[in-house]
Image (tube, coloured by chain):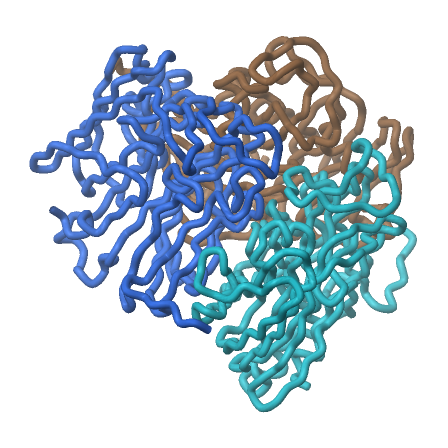
Chain colours: A brown, B cyan, C blue
Amino acid sequence: MNLWESRIRYPDGQIAPYQQGPNWRHFKLIAEPIKREIIEGLTIEALGYNGVTPGPLIIVEQGDWVILEVENRTDKPNALHIHGLAKPNFQDGMPAVEPTPTIQPGQSYTYRFQAWQVGSFFYHSSEIFQITRGLMGPFIVIPKQEQIPEWYIPYYDYVMVLQQWEIPQPELGKVELGTFQINKFDTDPNFFTFNGKSFPNTAPIYTSYGQKIRIRFINKSNTSHSMHTHGHDFKVVAVDGFPRNDWMDDTIDVASGRRFDVELLSNNPGIWVVNGTKTFHQSNNGIAPGGMISRLIYENYTPKSP
Amino acid sequence: MNLWESRIRYPDGQIAPYQQGPNWRHFKLIAEPIKREIIEGLTIEALGYNGVTPGPLIIVEQGDWVILEVENRTDKPNALHIHGLAKPNFQDGMPAVEPTPTIQPGQSYTYRFQAWQVGSFFYHSSEIFQITRGLMGPFIVIPKQEQIPEWYIPYYDYVMVLQQWEIPQPELGKVELGTFQINKFDTDPNFFTFNGKSFPNTAPIYTSYGQKIRIRFINKSNTSHSMHTHGHDFKVVAVDGFPRNDWMDDTIDVASGRRFDVELLSNNPGIWVVNGTKTFHQSNNGIAPGGMISRLIYENYTPKSP
Amino acid sequence: MNLWESRIRYPDGQIAPYQQGPNWRHFKLIAEPIKREIIEGLTIEALGYNGVTPGPLIIVEQGDWVILEVENRTDKPNALHIHGLAKPNFQDGMPAVEPTPTIQPGQSYTYRFQAWQVGSFFYHSSEIFQITRGLMGPFIVIPKQEQIPEWYIPYYDYVMVLQQWEIPQPELGKVELGTFQINKFDTDPNFFTFNGKSFPNTAPIYTSYGQKIRIRFINKSNTSHSMHTHGHDFKVVAVDGFPRNDWMDDTIDVASGRRFDVELLSNNPGIWVVNGTKTFHQSNNGIAPGGMISRLIYENYTPKSP
């Protein structure tokens, strides 16, 4: 396995299995109704790929032919689009506007295209209001191993998909547990997830002293999300798949459709907040702390009593 | 005519006529109540300049004296401000705060100032809640022809004004046709337009293989809009009138008051989506596809059946 | 006093007093219920530090040890976090997630850490819905005087904290005066302040011809704010404490958690608008002009009658 690929982590998510040959990888995605427990006791009836939302993480090498079989088990015709990765027109997956195939319910279609550009991308349904119900997932292109020196590869490479949900709840400031249908219009979101989980149920990000780690923030929601790491500044190494140079920061604004790759040096041991800084986004329907909060945990760290 | 000027396109919009002499151009704008059909059968009672919203596209050459006669046929005193282009104080057009003239209903005022800076700007009423009802339009300053080599000039230069509207509708997920007054507060927009039209009624952007085209995204709404092109990455060549260097991207976040000029090379024939990526913004009151979707169409392209 | 420190201005705000020694400064902050009149006749019952919201401006020199005594006179346990300035873990002030002390109501805690990085930061309560009620304030680290040539220091250095408030009001388009509790969820803000005041009650920014002035925009709200200066372009000199190079602009998007330092040359005498460009943000509950509007006033400027 490509060394970089072995370093990729997708907390709370599934990495898509694949078959491969020289210069191709074959994936299968099934779009279907799913359930997802985003905090303990609160489950959404959503749409997902292969049983989950966000969908499984697809990883390919630069130059690979991607063979992507998509089966539509939802009740509406749709297609699959990969945001940001240029493809020949008929493989672009936007049949309402472009001359590309529609996948009828119960049918499948297999996309074939080459992944020419390294970077962070995401795939989603061509139906907007299927996306807001969960039909999207991350898509990462990494360099071929021989094209990158080992020192450049992050020790861990975390993928964080930002989503928001409008879930029926009696009033702000309370959380009613149970199973709920998503309000697909998403004009008034009240739950905010990293990889489909809200705090306190988000899986941590782990590191150890001296490691360089990468975090990829990916957003296709109706709102921008402002992401922040405590105790560490970071270098923004790529925006929307394109490299940036020497751009240090501690807070970034990840607008809808955008992907920010940041790298930080683990030089400050502890247990740290990684979060969306918008105030309401750090709650579950107004109960804080919640929402877009995760933890960056140094392995084997023993908190010092102050 | 300046070659670059002849390349500028304003789909669904009007280009402002003018009189000119050496180093001056004279325009006339009338602010007045108008109607605009944003999708077939749905008309808004709005405010516009010279009968339209967004207002006519004003094009001047760098160094020109701009003589801008503004007549106020609305029912409120107002003035005209050009966002981003520095002018002498008394020509700035913000009479509620600055010592600049107010134009009473039925009266006119003529602004005179020099366009010293190349770039994308916009003009608007000094009354905030006239802007949300439509009183704004694009203002472009291009270089004098002798100052720019021909190869630098885009083959087409498209101007795209981003607007949003809060239109009374019975409920999300339906579109009631008819004629409607705008809710001027615009805190809960439900229609989203390029140059005053929502998909499927947006006029396409055309190109041909090998052409370099520019698109200027201009936003003065209550929300940021995240803009994306399918099948093509682009170079961000200017932000708010100032050049940027070597900044490739595929998605940009155009915040309120900002203007992004991007250039793409037409190297991927087809019929492509150009859109705002926020999910709800791709709908008409929750009916998708709609809203901020346009098409980039290669002339003489014949779709290949996949 | 450090020359740069003497140049810092915080319109409508209080600068925090301190005790100091070689390489340390000692501040005291008391978190408590407060009242703030944001426009004449409209007072919010909020939370503040030392009687005000936003809290007093803390200024330290790079390399200083900061001794920060925080007393909690609110009714909830909390702690104090300084956004963007990396500290040892147990001083980070996020006890719900990190192993750092909680301050019980009626208790105090004293933070001690070194300010290693020059830049604009802010402090806030660890309780999200105390922040939305006002518990935050600006924190500035300036270089030691011997490390910076005098010409580099701005003539004035203005600190502008951006806040928004959801205040109970009968309907949009009217302002009911009186004293009101803040709705802490802040999902539907209707008042927008610079340093705790809305237009027309915002204190102006002053300058004189030929001066270079800096403005620091600091945002920790639930929304991004798009900031604009009339009559003047500016150079973005730092983002989130990190220097930027040669980035001219006239409008910036200050997302939640971000801090933009801009510098402009006072070369265009007059009385000018400095504002947030989002339309509704320039009103007080829908009455315009209001909200995030301030004035840049040239001292001794006499308006010319046009």
Answer with left or right where residue B116 lies relative to residue B160: left
Image quadrant where residue C198 sits: top left
Answer with left or right where residue A127 lies relative to residue C231: right
- The residue drawn where x is 68% and y is 66% is B265
Instruction: Note whether residue A60 is visible.
Output: no
Q: Position of residue C5 (x, y in %)?
A: 19, 47
- The residue drawn where x is 54% and y is 35% is C175
- The residue drawn where x is 49% and y is 45% is C290
Image quadrant where residue A186 sits: top right
Residue lying farthest to the bottom in this orientation: B22
Q: Camera-side residue: A147 or A279?
A: A279
Can you say whether C123 is above or below B19 in the image? above
Q: Position of residue A202 (x, y in %)?
A: 54, 20
Residue lying farthest to the left in this orientation: C22
Can you say whether C275 is above or below A71 in the image? below
Q: Camera-side residue: A74 or B120?
A: B120
Q: Position of residue A221 (x, y in %)?
A: 65, 36
Q: Position of residue B118 (x, y in %)?
A: 53, 73
**Which quarter of the rendered picture does the N terminus of chain B lie within?**
bottom right
Instruction: Note whether residue C18 is visible.
Output: yes
